[in-house]
Each structure stands twice: as structure tokens, then as C-alpha cells.
Amino acid sequence: MMASARTSGLRRATDVFILAATIAFAILWLLPVVWVVAMSLKPNAELMRSTAGFLPVPFTLDNYIGLLKLDTVPRWLMHSLIVSVTMTILVLVVSSMAGYAFARLEFPVKKTLFMLVIAGLMVPEQAVFIPLHTMVSGWGLHNSHFALVMPRVAVPIGVFLMMQFFRSVPKELEEAAAIDHASRLTIFLKIMLPLSVPALTTLGLFTFIFAWNDFLWPLVSATKADMYTVTVGLASIQTNFAFSEGIGAVMASAVFASLPIVLLFLIFQRFIVAGVAMSAGK
């Protein structure tokens, strides 16, 4: 009895310690974010004297108003939205179909193709930039949405994650559908895809975040200011802001570029938790 009570007390103390450590690390991680937001809401004259403090006192929205007055910002936002949404849809289509094929179908050289997919995880992104740039340039596709989207559609980790999910689905569901004369495509569309909504949502959200925050490839492919995404566009004006508008405008541009991702995460966070919990449980 006493041993059980001692074990229970130790378990509670461990839980409290883990919770306290998690909260402490979360606060430590949030401090730079709060500092950036506070600086974006301070007048530049105040920031020239000191950048210390986590409270936006005195308060101003001039940094955001000046940013929104730029005619190119809405265009950059539209390009980022088009690229991110298109890339997310195509990644989900390709990853789900390829993952299902590797998980459930038998075809020649299946193991070899899967090894090639896994090998794609070990190739650094920067290693293929020169041949990719040369190929896209030879086709005359730079400064287009096609060039910004298509090189990022084949995502090895997406194929692997979807394959692992489909493998965890009981085969009896497919066998029952096959008895009812359902085709392989019908089974995939009406049974497997609805079951994989949490996994697809998680993959789609992370793909959208990656596409929205992507900087290196848009910087290489989009050489005209009219085709910049929001990350490249805001980076291109930060030097000017730093000298003319001040550090407050630079911080405002950072917050402005991050805000859509934060809102997206807040909206879909329950799907992320469901997808992670499902993966952990299986």
C-alpha cells in the first residue's frame, strides 16, 4: 500500500517536473517572437534609442501601414498563395497515390523504386540546384509559377509517410470492397482516402508551411520583382527599410510574412494533433 502510494507520488512529481520544463522551454522559445512583435509596434525614433523591452510602449502601427502602402506587397502575397496552394495539392495527390501503390500494389522493380525514393531523403537540396537551374533555364521557365512549383512536387518524405499510413489500414476493408466488385481506384478514392484525412491534413499543412517559407529556390528562379514570392520580396526591401524606414519596418515585415502561417496552424492544429496521435498509436 505504502509502496503504491510512493510510486503514485513519484509519478505525479515527474509529471509536474515535465510540465514545468515544457512551459519553461516554451516561454524561452517565445521570447524572441514577442520581442520582434514588440519592436514592430514601436516608433523607429524610439528604437534608435533602445531596442530593449517586450512591451510596445509607445505604441504605433506606422510600420505596418508603411509596409501595406507598397504596391508590390499584394502581388507578392498572391504569388506565395498560388505557389503554396498549388504545391500542397500536387504533393498530396502524388504522395497519396505513390504511398498507396508502394503499400498495397505489387509491380515490377517495386523495391528498387522504393529504394530510390528513400535515397531522395539523403540528397541535400542544395546539391541539385545547379542542374535544376540549368534545366529550368534551358526550357525558358524561370519567372513562372510552373518553375516555382514543379521541382518541389515529388516529396520523398510525403510518399514514405503516406505509405506507412496505408500499411496500417487493415486489409480486410479492401477485401470486403473487392468482394462487392469495387475497382482498385474506387477502393482508393472511397475507402483509403477518407481514412487518411488526418495524415493528409498534417502532410498538407507542413507542405504549405514549407512552400510559404521557401526562400532559396524562389530567389534563384524568380529574377523579376513582379514574380517574387512574399519571402523574397520582403527580403529584397529589408535593406532599404533598415536605412530609410528603420528597424521597426524590418520587424513588421517579418511579422507580416509569418502571420498567415500562424493563423493556418491555429485553425488546423487539431488535425495535426490527431495525425501525430494516430501515427504514434500505430
Image (cartoon, rainbow, N blue to C red):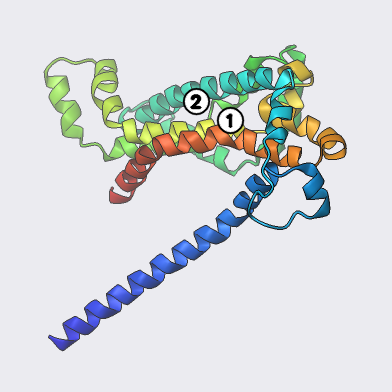
Q: What element carries label 2?
A: helix
Task: Tell me residue 54's x, y (percent).
Answer: 64, 55
Q: In which quarter of the image is residue 11?
A: bottom left
Which disc number belongs to residue 16? none
Of the image marks 2 and 1, the number of the one nearer the N terminus: 2
Q: Name the residue under label 1.
A: 211
Q: Name the residue under label 2.
A: 88
Query: Which residue is found at the position 36% from the left and 71% from the top?
Result: 16
In the image, is 9 to the left or to the right of 18?
A: left
Circle 2: residue type: Thr
In the image, is 170 to the left or to the right of 217?
A: left
Circle 1: residue type: Ala
As drawn, the residue found furthest toward the front would be: 58
Query: Which residue is found at the position 73% from the left and 12% from the top?
Result: 139
Query: Which residue is found at the position 80% from the left and 31% from the top?
Result: 237
In the image, is 124 to the left or to the right of 98?
A: right
Q: What element carries label 1?
A: helix
Q: How crowded is mark 1: few (under 14 residues within 10 Å), some or many (20 or more)?
A: many
Task: Tell me residue 275's x, y (percent).
Answer: 35, 41
Does residue 211 appear in this view?
yes
Q: Which of 246 and 115 is in front in this view?
A: 246
Does residue 158 appear in this view?
no
**Pointers 2 and 1 in contact (C-beta within 8 Å):** yes
Task: Tell me residue 34's x, y (percent).
Answer: 60, 51
Query: Which residue is found at the position 23% from the left and 24% from the top?
Result: 191
As drawn, the residue found furthest toward the right would be: 243
As drawn, the residue found furthest toward the bottom would be: 2
Task: Tell me residue 26's x, y (percent).
Answer: 50, 58
Q: Work out how far the residue at label 2 is from the one at label 1, CA to CA, in angstroms.
A: 8 Å
